[in-house]
Image (cartoon, helix red, strand yellow):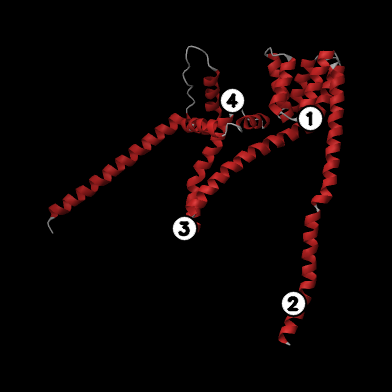
């Protein structure tokens, strides 16, 4: 065979390899540039007029990598959610606040983030379902993706409830501390500052710390209490805040109000524990019946089987 065709084939192969390497290198370069640009926390440009929404988005871009990387997609899903879940958005916003998430999140955007997580996991679910079930697994993958988005939504509500429980468990101790400090001569702001430092990163300390920050920035004490009540939106906390606001309007000393509300919270906790204890017997009834039925089957099963086999063989 002539060496010229071999040389031509060799050069063609080398040329294709070079072109493929250039394409792969270019794609990797573009991908690295996109990732670097997405991860950078450059602020959006503002108009001459100050706009809170632009600053809110900038804060989210700094603190949330997923939001920063997929910002256009989250915004697209948020517009979709505003129309489709309009009735549920107020409740989702309340749960975001009660769960202690960033105050810069809006309900449509956070719901879009949950949907985005489900979409990003969709290829893994698709591959796994098709491997196990074949082509029909594609339908199962879609169903699992929708289920995952719903589970993430339910998890937000559960997180909000769990944080409210933690707040209500520790609030009597915080109110007691405020009472002792104010009876010792501290002002309300001084007592609140020390109580917030004492409870640190606990949810009740975080919430009262936010209220303290609002008061220090010039917001009225009543307005700050009402803002905390609206964030948490719990019946017991609403009752406490209402009592404090009413006491201030009537001139009742705050120390006395705090002591009274701490006692009320403890009484409610005791009543709640008694209710749970009374319900435990009813909730244990079904497992008890199942255990007894299983025990009877284990004891009588061999005799019944022996009798049946003996009659059959006889």
Dots 3 and 1: beta carbons under 8 Å? no
Separation of residues labelled 1 and 4 (CA atoms): 26 Å
* Residue denoted by label 2: 305
Labels 1, 4: front one: 1
Check disc 1 and report its element: helix, strand or loop. helix
Contact between marks 1 and 2 (CB within 8 A): the answer is no
Q: Is residue 279 left or right of residue 13?
A: right
Residue 65 shows in this picture: no
Give the camera-side residue of 7 and 307: 307
> Residue at (77%, 64%) from the top-left corner?
294
Q: Badge 3 is on which residue?
A: 134
Closer to the chain start, of discs 3 and 2, is 3
Residue 236: numbered disc = 1
Q: Are marks 1 and 4 in contact (CB under 8 Å)?
A: no
Q: Residues within 10 Å of mark 3 (few under 14, many from 20)?
A: few
How many numbered marks does the figure carry? 4
Task: Return the mark for residue 104.
Answer: 4
């Amino acid at each position: 065979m002539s060496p010229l065709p071999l040389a031509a084939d060799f050069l063609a192969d080398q040329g294709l390899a070079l072109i493929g390497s250039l394409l792969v290198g270019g794609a990797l370069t573009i991908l690295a540039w996109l990732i670097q640009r997405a991860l950078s926390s450059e602020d959006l440009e503002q108009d001459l007029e100050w706009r809170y929404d632009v600053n809110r988005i900038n804060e989210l871009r700094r603190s949330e990598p997923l939001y920063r990387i997929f910002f256009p997609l989250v915004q697209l899903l948020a517009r979709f959610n505003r129309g489709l879940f309009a009735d549920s958005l107020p409740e989702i916003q309340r749960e975001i606040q009660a769960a202690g998430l960033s105050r810069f999140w809006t309900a449509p955007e956070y719901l879009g983030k949950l949907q985005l997580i489900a979409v990003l996991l969709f290829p893994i679910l698709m591959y796994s379902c098709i491997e196990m079930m074949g082509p029909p697994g594609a339908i199962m993958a879609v169903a699992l993706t929708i289920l995952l988005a719903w589970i993430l939504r339910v998890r937000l509500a559960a997180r909000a409830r769990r944080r409210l429980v933690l707040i209500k468990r520790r609030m009597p101790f915080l109110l007691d501390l405020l009472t002792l400090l104010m009876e010792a001569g501290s002002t309300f702001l001084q007592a609140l500052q020390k109580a917030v430092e004492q409870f640190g990163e606990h949810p009740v300390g975080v919430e009262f710390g936010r209220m303290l920050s609002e008061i220090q920035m010039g917001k009225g004490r009543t307005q700050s209490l009402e803002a905390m009540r609206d964030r948490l939106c719990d019946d017991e906390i609403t009752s406490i805040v209402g009592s404090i606001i009413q006491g201030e309007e009537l001139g009742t000393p705050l120390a006395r109000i705090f002591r009274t509300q701490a006692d009320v919270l403890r009484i409610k906790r005791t009543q709640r524990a008694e209710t749970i204890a009374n319900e435990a017997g009813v909730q244990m009834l079904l497992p008890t019946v199942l255990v007894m039925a299983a025990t009877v089957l284990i004891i009588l099963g061999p005799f019944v089987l022996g009798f049946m086999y003996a009659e059959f063989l006889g």
